[in-house]
Amino acid sequence: MPLFHTHVVVDWSARSKPSPERESRDAIWWAVARSDGGSVPEPAYARTRHEALEGLAAFIAGELDAGRRVLAGFDFPFGYPAGVAKHLTGEASALALRDWLAARIEDAPDNANNRYAVAAVINRTYPGLGPFWGHPPTWRCPDVPARASARTGQDCHPPERRIADLRATGAKTVWQLAYAGSVGSQMLLGLPALKRLVADPRIEGRAAVWPFHTGLRAPEAQAVIAEVYPSLLRNEVRVRRQAGEILDRAQVRVNADAFARLDACGGLAPFFEGAPGLTPGERRLIAAEEAWILGLGHEEALKGTLTQVRDLHLCS
């Protein structure tokens, strides 16, 4: 039996202004697929984070109210490298660090935000200059260098990458705030957004964040929020991208479909256990502080499912 009825994949954005009215790249996109192959809405485009959260909360609540379990994957890291949470909050907990950020990040309905100011605050808690780096050319702050090479005191800085980032091909460091492929800004704005989503009155008490609320195991919650990395299927997205389709749209559509297909065949549960070969110590860090990318370590199973027929009778 599938674990979930509905699978959602979200491509997040750290834009500081609303995205264009016309659908565009580097904005927020999310797509839906169902494990039974049922009809789904077209991928959704949101101009602001507030608009996206409202749409996602309403959709997830509707699915839960209809008795359908939901898996929602977001494409930014859910945790910082080991040690960061305790350094900032006194507690080795990604959820404590999420709450710490949520108390400091300001993210207005028009996407205006203070993420660079919060990054500067964090940098000042470490010796030297860093660990955060990268900013637009017009932005000036002595506490956040423009380039990684300008950082100092790095012997006293936290690790550059999480356990998952070291294993995921092409994964960027969480400390990079700007330039191609960066995830640092999306993370600073995304973690407080996840807190608001899980606490939304329409779904509160029915959603869990994997693996922090659940451990590294298949969750029992009605709605599960997980970290995903659409580039695990970069070649499959390239092949299945429609003519003229925006890449972000294709990524969420293909990834949601892959998770739903695999779940339909009963193959999703092992993903929630993390990758094979993780040590007990790594598993403890992942479950408490760092998080894990859903599907990392199981790439071939995820890729292979895109060639399978959706008929549940053929999945046995």
Image (cartoon, rainbow, N blue to C red):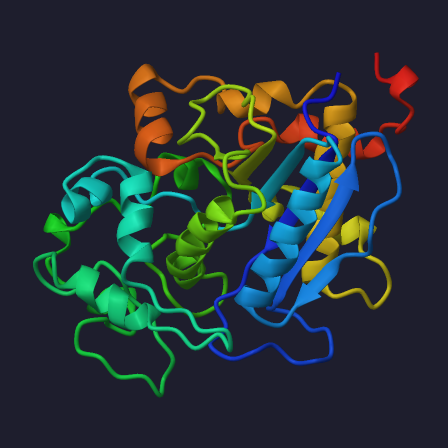
Please state the horizontal and vertical placement of residue 281, each as a whole percent of the image: 29, 20
Q: Is residue 236 visible?
A: no
Q: Is residue 136 left or right of residue 26?
A: left
Q: Quadrant of residue 300?
A: top right
Determine the residue positioned at 37% across, 65% down: 177
Please state the horizontal and vertical placement of residue 221, each as a whole percent of the image: 56, 27
Determine the residue positioned at 20% across, 60% down: 122
Q: Is residue 240 left or right of residue 145?
A: right
Please state the horizontal and vertical placement of residue 121, each as a whole percent of the image: 18, 65
Say which quadrant the N terminus sits in. top right
In the displayed structure, would residue 217 be above or below residue 70?
above
Residue at the farthest left position: 127
Q: Is residue 148 visible?
A: yes
In the displayed structure, would residue 229 be above or below residue 302?
below
Please state the horizontal and vertical placement of residue 129, each as a whole percent of the image: 14, 65
In the displayed structure, would residue 209 be above or below residue 275?
below
Q: Quadrant of residue 3?
A: top right
Determine the residue positioned at 11% across, 56% down: 126
In the displayed structure, would residue 314 be above or below residue 175?
above
Determine the residue positioned at 70% across, 80% down: 21
Q: Is residue 113 left or right of residue 42?
A: left
Say which quadrant the C terminus sits in. top right
Most foreground residue, 8 or 238: 8
How many circles with numbers are drawn on the protein? 0
